[in-house]
Amino acid sequence: MLLEALTSTAPSFPSFRRQCPTTLSCHVSFDVSGLNTRRNPTMKVTACSKVESSSFPLEKKRKVVEHLCLLKAKQVLSDKDEKDMLDYLYTSQYQMRGIVAVSLGRISNDNVENYTHAVFMRFQTKADVTKFYENPFYSKVLKEHVMPYCHDLVNVDYESEVEDDMLPIFRKGEEFNYGVEFVHLFAFDDSALGAPVEDALASLEKLRKEFPSLIVQSTQGSNFNLSSKEYTHAVVTRFRSSEAFEIFLGSTEYRDVWRSKFERIIRKTLPIHFSVDPVGKEVM
């Protein structure tokens, strides 16, 4: 069980609890100060058991549009060239309207498609994404600072919802300054599109919501990028730390959902993750 994995990962310590607006069957706190958490060496993880019921009103939501770009860098890529590429991609948000959040980095795990870098951008509307692709500044960034170092890329765009509040919409605040970005792309069987896919994604979303101690935010949706239909759906999850990421993906609950809801309807899948570390601070 995920709760068992959490309580067996590290010893207990003085409580610092994240409030969950739900009725919980139990509450466990433990110290991860001895683990390697990014930018927060005293970070505490609070484990909440599965959500049972709540007397709180439903959370108000705001639609957002997520853009994903996975890159395949050439084998010969110097640290300087890599930094230049990521800097220009990151600071492009200051040169174009519509981008409300960016995270990017070098992919940490091996993957069958051999993608090396990932870029996540959030927009307010689909129209903003269309303007983004057509923007001369972005075209110049790709031509002069990305494609000289990469030989392939894939784009995925989907609409989702987040809490209707400034911090979660713009991904601002202390909890968004570090962690692991987990990008999972799916190509579902055509015969499963509809109820089976919706049921699988709903089950995954429900599970993620039950453990806010591990996850900062997660979105998911259907890919509407007509020029890149290799993948039908995408999920992006920000974990609080690498330890939280490993605990969740290694849990019995996650494996049960994957086995019972996803395995039989998946044609192709691409899971990648990278550590969050903003690289651009000055406008290029």
Image (cartoon, rainbow, N blue to C red):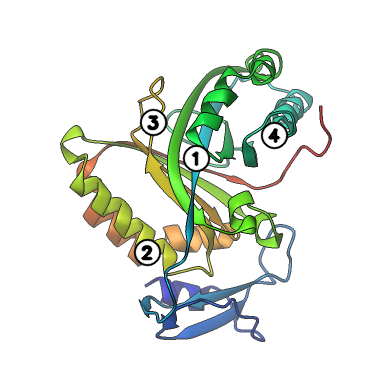
Hey, which quadrant is residue 283 in on the image? top right
**Label placed on residue 207:** 2
- For the question of whether residue 178 can be seen, the reply is no
Q: Earlier in the sequence, mark 2 or mark 1?
A: 1
Residue occupied by mark 4 = 93
Which residue is at the far right?
282
Of badges 2 and 3, nearer the viewer stands 3
Where is residue 229? Give x, y as percent: 35, 25
Within 10 Å of disc 4 (Cα), the crowding (few <14, some 14-19, many 20+) is some
Classify mark 3: helix, strand or loop. loop
Inter-mark Cα distance, 4 to 1: 15 Å
Q: Earlier in the sequence, mark 3 or mark 4?
A: 4
Which residue is located at x 59 percent, y 76 percent?
18
What is the quadrant of the N terminus in the image?
bottom left
Which residue is located at x 35 percent, y 57 percent?
204
Inter-mark Cα distance, 2 to 1: 22 Å
Inter-mark Cα distance, 3 to 4: 22 Å
**Label placed on residue 65:** 1
Residue occupied by mark 3 = 224
- For the question of whether residue 263 can be seen, the reply is yes
Which residue is located at x 56 percent, y 76 percent?
46
Inter-mark Cα distance, 3 to 1: 10 Å
| Left/right of residue 39 with respect to residue 146 in the rendered view | right
**For this rendering, which residue is in front, 141 or 32?**
141
Classify mark 4: helix, strand or loop. helix
Q: Amino acid at mark 3?
A: Phe
Q: Earlier in the sequence, mark 3 or mark 1?
A: 1
Where is residue 235? Give x, y as percent: 43, 46
Q: Amino acid at mark 1?
A: Val
Where is residue 169? Give x, y as percent: 59, 52
Q: Are the residues at dot 2 and dot 3 in contact (C-beta closer than 8 Å)?
A: no
